[in-house]
Every structure is written in structure tokens, then in C-alpha cells.
Amino acid sequence: MYAPPPWLIALGAIITAIAVAGALYAWAWSRDRRRIAIATAAAVVAFLVWRAALIIANGANLDVDYPVLLGLSFEDIGSGVMAFLFVALALGLGLDRLEPAHRVITSAGLAGAAAILVDRFV
């Protein structure tokens, strides 16, 4: 049964927020405080929604590390995909709807990569 302790889920959400904010701050275009706040909030919501889906579906089989793919599991990749999706939607439909798509997608990609790295090591 997939049932991580609540403190571990909370810790993962906090570290995801920090990692996403740091990744977006590293790219000059995305340094706007509102953009970082929206993307961070979207990534944390994505992290929590993904965890809820894994718990409801008993996703223990998704937490098996695959050595050929840098030791990532489907759980880790799912965290990144959900973060990418939520950040792309939040920025693309909200704050940055008038910006070029490549900037929004790059920001979402950075958030997704940060979420994968956090989930890989937490």
C-alpha cells in the first residue's frame, strides 16, 4: 500500500516550492515576483494533487527506480509532468497570456525539472 507519512508529503511540497522558486529565479526572464509566486503555488498544488492520486490509486508500483533512466521512477517523472502542466496552465492562461509561448513553456519546464529532482531525492 502506498501511504507516505504526512510529514514527508509536507516536506516534499516545501522543498518543491523552494526548488521551483530557485529554478525560476535563475532564469532572468522569469524573475518577476508574481511569476515566481504563481508558478511556485501551481507546482505545490501539482505536487499535492499527484500525491493524492498516488495514495487513492495505491501507486506503490510507480515508486520503483529505473536505473537506465537516471534512477528515476514513474512517480518522480509524474511529479515533473504535473508540475509542468500546472505551471504552464497557470502562467499561460493567467499572468503571461500575452507573452511568447516559448517563455511560458521554458518556465514550466524549469518548474517540472525542479519537481523531478526534488521527488528523486526526497
Image (spheres, rainbow, N blue to C red):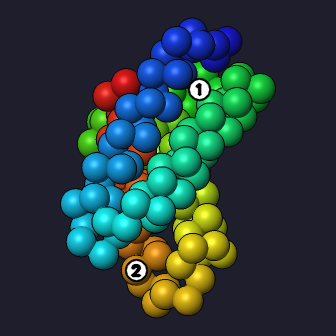
Q: In the image, which is nearer the foreground, mark 1 or mark 2?
A: 2
Q: Give the distance between the C-alpha atoms of the residues marked 1 and 2, in whole angstroms.
A: 35 Å
Q: Is 62 left, or right, of 122 in this rendering? A: right
The quarter of the rendered structure image containing the C terminus is top left
Mark 2 is surrounded, within 10 Å at the Cα level, by few (under 14), some (14 to 19) or many (20 or more) other residues, namely some
Query: Could you tell me which residue is drawn at 60 percent across and 58 percent down?
Result: 86
x%, y% of residue 97?
Answer: 59, 83
SS of the residue at dot 1?
A: helix
Along the viewing direction, whichever of 2 and 13 lies nearer the viewer: 13
Along the viewing direction, whichever of 113 and 64 lies nearer the viewer: 113
Q: Which residue lies furthest to the front in this view?
A: 33
x%, y% of residue 6?
Answer: 59, 13
Q: Is 5 left, or right, of 117 in this rendering? A: right
Residue type at numbered disc 2? Arg
From this view, report whether residue 91 is shown above or below residue 20.
Answer: below
From this view, report whether residue 35 is shown above or below residue 100.
Answer: above
Query: Could you tell me which residue is drawn at 37 percent across and 67 percent down?
Result: 32
Which image quarter: residue 52? Answer: top right
From this view, report whether residue 66 is shown above or below residue 115.
Answer: above
The quarter of the rendered structure image containing the N terminus is top right
SS of the residue at dot 2?
A: helix
Mark 1 or mark 2: which comes first in sequence?
1
x%, y% of residue 119?
Answer: 41, 34
x%, y% of residue 18?
Answer: 35, 39
Q: Which mark is on residue 61? A: 1
Query: Could you tell me which residue is drawn at 36 percent across and 50 percent down?
Result: 21
Q: Residue furthest right?
A: 56
Q: Which mark is on residue 103? A: 2
Residue type at numbered disc 1? Asn
Which image quarter: residue 9? Answer: top right
Q: Which mark is on residue 106? A: none
